[in-house]
Amino acid sequence: MLQVGDKAPNFKGINQNGETVALSDFKGKKIILYFYPKDNTSGCTAEACSLNDKSEYFLHKGYVIIGVSPDSVESHKKFEEKNNLSFNLISDPEKRIIQAYGAWGEKKNYGKTYMGLLRTTFIISEKGTIEKVFPRVDTKTHADQIIKSLM
């Protein structure tokens, strides 16, 4: 897992509109980069909507929101449309971005251990360094978690 002060790994992926999105596209901007397991699940929908509800606040503060999951471009498009999301959702089925950020690892559920996406958010500075890491995300109030940490 990346730590505060680390250089954010560069990435490139395809968003819900079929456009290429790269970290370098946001040079000089602050980024909220969040990793989530699956479109249209209750926790992931709550998290996306929490961030979307505060997207104007984040934009005003100079932040761009980018979501990343292993879901397909088509799945992301439906998720965006269903929830009126206002930010990029990057499809990462090969888990290149997910692994580069250390958001793939061992999970436990009902006594079973398996490999999966670790719901994590990174705040990246204008200079491309990690400013904050949220390894424990409260999906319903995630935007407020971030806002509180920025104060």
Image: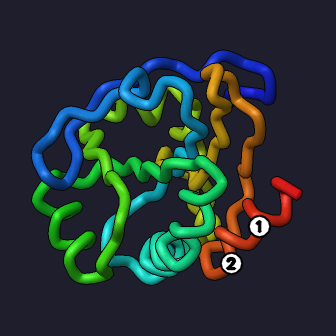
Q: What residue appears at the point 34 percent right and 71 percent down from the top-left corner?
A: 85
Residue 110: % across, % down: 60, 72
The quadrant in which residue 30 appears is top right
**Which structural element holds mark 1?**
helix
Q: Which of 26 and 116 is in front in this view?
A: 26
Q: What residue appears at the point 88 percent right and 58 percent down from the top-left corner?
A: 151
Q: What residue appears at the point 76 percent right and 34 percent down from the top-left corner?
A: 131
Q: Nearer the viewer, residue 119 or 147?
A: 147
**Residue type pointed to by label 2:** Thr
User: Pointer 2: what residue?
Assistant: 141
Residue 108: % across, % down: 62, 58
**Residue type pointed to by label 1:** Gln
**Which structural element holds mark 2?**
helix
Residue that lies at the very extreme toward the right in this rendered image: 151
Which quarter shows the N terminus?
top right
Residue 89: % across, % down: 32, 53
Residue that lies at the very extreme toward the front in this rendered image: 60
Q: Which of 88 and 103 is in front in this view?
A: 88
Q: Which mark is residue 145?
A: 1
